[in-house]
Image (tube, coloured by chain):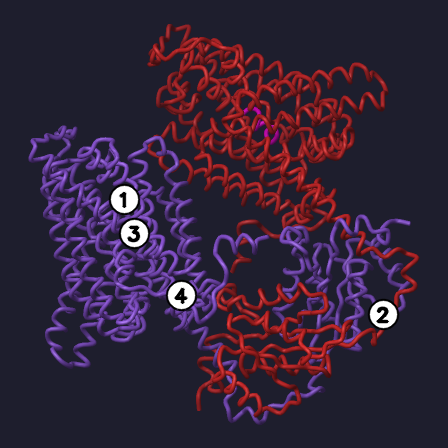
Chain colours: A purple, B red
Amino acid sequence: MFKEIKRLLIGRPLKNEAIHGEKFGVLWGLPILSSDAISSVAYAGQEILIVLLPAIGMLAFKQLTYISAAIIVLLAILTLSYRQTIDSYPNGGGAFIVAKENIGSIAGVVAGSALSISYILTVSVSIASGVDQIVSAFTQLEHYRVLLCILIILLMTIGNLRGVRESAAIFSLPTYFFIISILFMLVMGVIKVFNGYQPEPLNIAQDTLQPLTLFLILQAFTNGCAALTGVEAVSNAVPNFREPSTKNAKTVLVLLSTLVLIVFGGTSIIANYYPTDPEKGAMLVQISNMIFGRTFPFYIITALSFVILVLAANTAYFGFPNLISVMAKEGYVPRQLNMRGDRLSYSNGIILLSGIAILLIIAFNANITSLIGLYAIGVFISFTLSQAGMLLKWLNQKGENWIVKASINGFGALVTFGVVIVIAITKFAQGTWIVVIVIPILVFMMQKVKKHYIAVSKQLRIKPEELQSIQVERDTYRNRVIVPIESINKSSIRALRYAKTISDNVVAFSVSIDEENANKLRERYNMINTDIPLIIKYSPFRKVVEPLLKFIESAEYDYNKGDMITVILPQFSVRSWWHRVLHNQTRVFIERELLKHKHIVVAVMPLQLKDDDYVLKHPKYQDR
Amino acid sequence: MFKEIKRLLIGRPLKNEAIHGEKFGVLWGLPILSSDAISSVAYAGQEILIVLLPAIGMLAFKQLTYISAAIIVLLAILTLSYRQTIDSYPNGGGAFIVAKENIGSIAGVVAGSALSISYILTVSVSIASGVDQIVSAFTQLEHYRVLLCILIILLMTIGNLRGVRESAAIFSLPTYFFIISILFMLVMGVIKVFNGYQPEPLNIAQDTLQPLTLFLILQAFTNGCAALTGVEAVSNAVPNFREPSTKNAKTVLVLLSTLVLIVFGGTSIIANYYPTDPEKGAMLVQISNMIFGRTFPFYIITALSFVILVLAANTAYFGFPNLISVMAKEGYVPRQLNMRGDRLSYSNGIILLSGIAILLIIAFNANITSLIGLYAIGVFISFTLSQAGMLLKWLNQKGENWIVKASINGFGALVTFGVVIVIAITKFAQGTWIVVIVIPILVFMMQKVKKHYIAVSKQLRIKPEELQSIQVERDTYRNRVIVPIESINKSSIRALRYAKTISDNVVAFSVSIDEENANKLRERYNMINTDIPLIIKYSPFRKVVEPLLKFIESAEYDYNKGDMITVILPQFSVRSWWHRVLHNQTRVFIERELLKHKHIVVAVMPLQLKDDDYVLKHPKYQDR
């Protein structure tokens, strides 16, 4: 039944060859990769106001325009820089690869960790903001903020487990609709202002206002920087583009920046004429309410903002699994993260992403302001390392126009590094210290993982010249068998019979909590025709493994070093998923404990159970 | 490392014999078992007001007193009834046992399901209310309501996994302190009223008031019935009492009822003089704020209310695991739920309880009003079945004074059945429909589980007279071996050698995604000295199991029915928990798939890995 549900939700498995079909061009690539950057219009401006409004009152709206302009300049610098990255890395120029190849493996791992964190926060922040839009429009849902976030992330997980192409198909059109609807709102807003619209003044306590300090502006700027998170995704996703993939990716990157300029810039300007109070809900929802009232366009814009934020979160469902699959290939994270699922998506990566994003939503109570600092610092650390890597690349390889190229990437590195410092300082108390702690831990762990994989492959390796000296013969060593039994039943008899076919040194072994049970068992055992001796041990801890291991080591068993011991464990072969739950998993625990010993092989013997109804009706099984 | 954390959190394992020490007398039994009923003072009154206050305004406080009186009468009836249950069932007279023995197995299972639901809701409601107290006193915590609930439940889970006695020791004193502090508050409240205290009038919109209907009163009554949930726990916990356990349990039951009378009754009366608005936080917190202001006693009472509610939730950590372990013994729920953990507590039951309680907290957003209907109906369904069972018991067995006894239980059954009907009707839309759906599903599932266990034991059973005809011989059938290999490395060579010792019919098997890889493998394989043939199959799905099974069924393999096939799977024997994560679990999946076939035995062969540092430094493993 689980399988059927999985099939229903995730679809039929795809063949290896299908992988090349799951790619996109400019038309689909743009909405998928730009949604992250464009959707930030829904929270970046609002988070700037959250910092400034309580401090400087209505002046905040003027500052919002300036800060947005600064952020758009930053975006232009990044666009220029990343066009060069795309050119140089047609197989995906994520910060991990660029930093690792040009700076060194530690830098690569730092960039990879930072980027992983920011992908996870893309999901948390975008979904929290998406739900914020809905809740701002329909305030009665306020109590279900966290629950709604979790449900949406779960739905997205299923969608993405289905595979790349289908998610693109589902999610493409709304982005375009969103862009059109925001442009429409901007135009209508301007017309309304020309027609003499006067907003209600905001109710801000004048006596709490403070002077506008540099620190405040930088803090606001930091919040706005969350708008720049989609850029990396494009350069990382180059191999997901159809040919010519490099050109397609660069086109998408430029289009993306232009769209952010128009949508984010335009909204920041119009906010001057439609001042909003972030305390009272999402900024976009409030502005469109002022422009349209509670009419059809208002609901459309709210719905589309929500959808595009979901889409933005979806960007991370490409970026994150791809990134960690690359890191898994290199041995920095567990290999499973490089295994594609039935539908050719990186299932483990997708599930990991959703899991951590949900934890963050719960821990930070779906609060965007708390999450946004973590988000921005992760992104800008990877920006810095990626640009620094590109700079070193030009310095080393030179080539045509290398001085111009090096200057562009060098300037990018410098600016983004400056932003990292600003974010770290202004937001330290609000959570960026977490990133400062987590990244070194991740880097340490990844180095350990890499070391382990290298050590394992060295241990397993047989060099070609050694192959000819290898002998696989019957009499390398002796195999002995132990059959743990609980009682004399059809299952234990079957195990004893199997034991006899694989060895002529077999022992039946049982634990008992008291003498009475031991005697009963021995009595029944003595009635069957076998030359296999039965050993019964008293076990005060109700456990099998310890007495069994003690027995093996005892003089009684007379074990010769070099021999293998096969322990046979019966296992019900269950007919349906719920039967699995009904048979306690002691076999799994015993198996795990025994397998810690290199001289013990565990042979699991299935016992097929008949259908319950059949057994209960068939006269053979009834008491006579 | 996991083991060490587990040990640290849960403590050292206890021996079987230790189980008899883990019991309590009246002094400890009272706080443990009464906390549920007594703590309801923190929410029952408040939930009555939530229904009445918006409808009838200040008149609600008079009605609160009447409804509380009715609930206390109900408690007296239940106390009388349940004293008889305790006498008749010294081994624990839970509704499940009483209903099953006297009415029938279906009734028992219904009672068990209803009771399980109400135990789970004891945790959800009590913890939600506990956090409500804290949040009402410290409003800045409002945003972390759900998170706080989850954290507390997790802490309780750990505490209870440590075992019965220690939790009692930790949790006993606060209950007594709580009772004393409430009495102190009542006395101080009365003194303040005599000194002429006048409360601020509540701000209730007069125009929304409605007439006081019977439906309203019944709805309020339903909410109050949640105060009666601790009674069942006493009769269920009889075997947890020290000898004379029956007498101790009855004493505790009577003391419990008296305490509820004083604490709950007293608070309901004093609420008339200190009217509170449930919209503005927990009732107890508001009353003590009015009486004491924000002084030391206020904080003490808030803290103790919180602690006693945690204690109340803790009641369920006795009741639920005990109940389902009884049901597991009878085969109605999975057997694992009857397995005691290292510390002799029913670990699986405890974890299950916490898991569902947390899910409910998240789903209902820690809202008491939403949860309380589900809570009350579960409790009263089990009350009804338990009392009806007792009635039938007296009618069947007669005995001394049976008419009086039958009348008491019969009256109890009648009254509680009436309450079930009232709850179902008044709260249907607010969630009791869930219980109406869930109980039949649970009952259906439990019957299926029971049937399965019976069918399994019938299949496995060997009757004594059959034992003598059983032969365990070497030549029952032939054993053949298949060794799946990915490449020629030390692990696969080891598996091939083992295969040779257990059979002389061995085949090496490999899947390949293309010709090139297949040729490379065969080239290396041909260099080693062995007579084992290598079979290579093309696998488009990157999977091993399907081609392997297809090969076994093919004419190429020439498999004789009746033979066993042993498939050898190597498994890294990992040195630490994090290494386990690093080796992908394909072995587990392959094993599970193969074990669906009754003629396949899976032999898992451990390969011990050396320490990473050792391998990386030792010259033996370096490239020459």
- Which residue in the protein does label 2 denote? B472
10 Å neighbourhood of mark 2: few (<14), some, or many (≥20)?
many
* Quadrant of res B96: top right
Mark 3 lies on residue: A173
Same chain, marks 3 and 1? yes
Q: What is the x, y in percent for residue B294?
A: 35, 23
Same chain shared by disc 4 and disc 2: no
SS for tag 4?
A: helix
Q: Secondary structure at mark 3?
A: helix
Above or below, B85 relative to A37: above
Q: Main secondary structure of the magenta part?
A: helix
The image's mark for residue B255 is none
Residue A212: name its quadrant: top left
Q: CA distance from mark 3 to mark 1?
A: 13 Å
Element marked by disc 2: loop
Q: Is residue A152 magenta?
A: no
- Label 3 marks a residue whose chain is A
Q: Is residue B34 magenta?
A: yes
Residue that label 4 marks: A445
Q: Are marks 2 and 1 on the same chain?
A: no
Task: Answer few, some or many: residues within 10 Å of disc 4's Cα (few below 14, many 20 plus, some between 14 and 19).
Answer: some
Q: In the rendered structure, which segment of residues is drawn in magenta?
A: B31-39
Q: Which residue is mark 1?
A: A305
Q: Is residue B405 above or below residue B325?
A: above
The C terminus of chain B lies in which quarter of the figure? bottom left
What kind of residue is marked 4?
Met
- Chain letter for the residue marked with disc 2 in the picture: B
Q: Residues within 10 Å of mark 3 (few under 14, many from 20)?
A: some
**Tag 2: amino acid:** Val
